[in-house]
C-alpha cells in the first residue's frame, strides 16, 4: 500500500480574480508550477484549520471559518511517490493588496482571472484544468479522483459535484 499525504488548496478570490502561487522554491512536489494557495495538513490538524493556516502563511491574509467555503475533496493516485488526499476551499478576501507582498518563501503570488490562469505560460498543476471553472461557477462541492502518469499528468479522472 502506498503512503497517503494530505493537503489543502485554497482558491482565494476578490472581484473576479484568483490568487495563484508560482512555486519557485526548491521542492519535490509541483515544482515550478502555478497552483492555488495551500500545502500539507500538519499532524493533528484538520483540513479547515490547514486552509486557514496556509492562507495566512503564504499570503498574510487573516481569514476565519466564516470566510471559507468548502469547495471539494480529491485524491490523486500514482504519478507522485505517494498518493494525495486533498481538501479544496474557496476564500474571499477584502482586497487585491496581499499583506506580505507579491512573493513568499514558496514563490511568486499572482492575481489572475480564470481565463488568464488557463492561458498562462507558467504550467498549471494538472487538476486545476478541471477544477478552476467549477470553482468560479460555484459548482460546489466537487469530488475528484485522478490517476496520474509518471509525468504527474492526469490519465484518468472521475469528477462530480453535488
Image: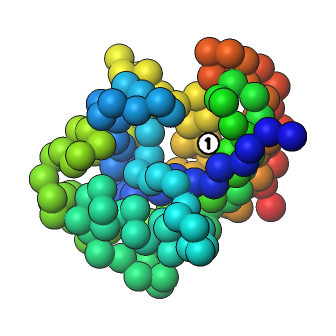
Q: Residue at x 58, y 28 (%)?
A: 126
Res 33 quadrant in image = top left
Q: In the rendered view, would you say 16 is above or below 34? A: below
Residue 125 in view: yes
Residue furthest out toward the right: 1
Given residues 100 and 14, the one toward you in this image is 100
Instruction: State the image coordinates of residue 38 (x, y, percent, origin top left).
Output: 45, 53
Given residues 35 and 140, the one toward you in this image is 35
Q: How many marks?
A: 1
Q: In the rendered view, would you say 143 is above or below 48? A: above
The quarter in which the C terminus is drawn is: bottom right
Position of residue 127 in the picture relative to residue 25 (left or right): right
Q: Secondary structure at mark 1?
A: helix
Position of residue 146 in the picture relative to residue 71 (left or right): right
Q: Residue at x 77, y 35 (%)?
A: 77
Q: In the rendered view, would you say 31 is above or below 162? A: above
Instruction: State the image coordinates of residue 148 (x, y, percent, origin top left).
Output: 73, 25
Q: Residue at x 44, y 77 (%)?
A: 67
Q: Residue at x 57, y 67 (%)?
A: 43
Instruction: State the image coordinates of residue 112 (x, y, percent, origin top left).
Output: 32, 40
Given residues 104 and 73, the one toward you in this image is 104
Position of residue 105 in the picture relative to residue 69 (left or right): left
Amino acid at each position: 500500500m502506498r503512503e497517503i499525504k494530505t493537503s489543502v488548496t485554497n482558491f482565494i478570490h476578490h472581484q473576479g480574480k484568483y490568487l495563484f502561487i508560482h512555486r519557485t522554491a526548491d521542492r519535490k512536489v509541483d515544482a515550478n508550477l502555478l497552483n492555488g494557495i495551500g500545502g500539507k495538513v500538519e499532524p493533528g490538524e484538520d483540513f479547515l484549520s490547514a486552509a486557514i493556516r496556509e492562507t495566512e502563511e503564504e499570503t498574510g491574509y487573516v481569514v476565519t471559518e466564516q470566510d471559507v467555503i468548502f469547495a471539494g475533496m480529491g485524491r490523486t493516485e500514482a504519478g507522485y511517490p505517494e498518493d494525495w488526499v486533498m481538501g479544496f476551499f474557496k476564500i474571499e478576501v477584502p482586497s487585491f493588496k496581499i499583506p506580505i507582498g507579491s512573493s513568499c518563501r514558496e514563490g511568486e503570488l499572482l492575481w489572475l482571472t480564470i481565463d488568464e490562469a488557463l492561458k498562462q505560460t507558467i504550467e498549471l498543476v494538472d487538476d486545476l484544468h478541471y477544477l478552476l471553472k467549477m470553482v468560479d461557477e460555484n459548482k460546489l462541492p466537487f469530488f475528484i479522483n485522478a490517476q496520474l502518469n509518471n509525468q504527474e499528468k492526469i490519465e484518468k479522472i472521475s469528477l462530480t459535484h453535488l
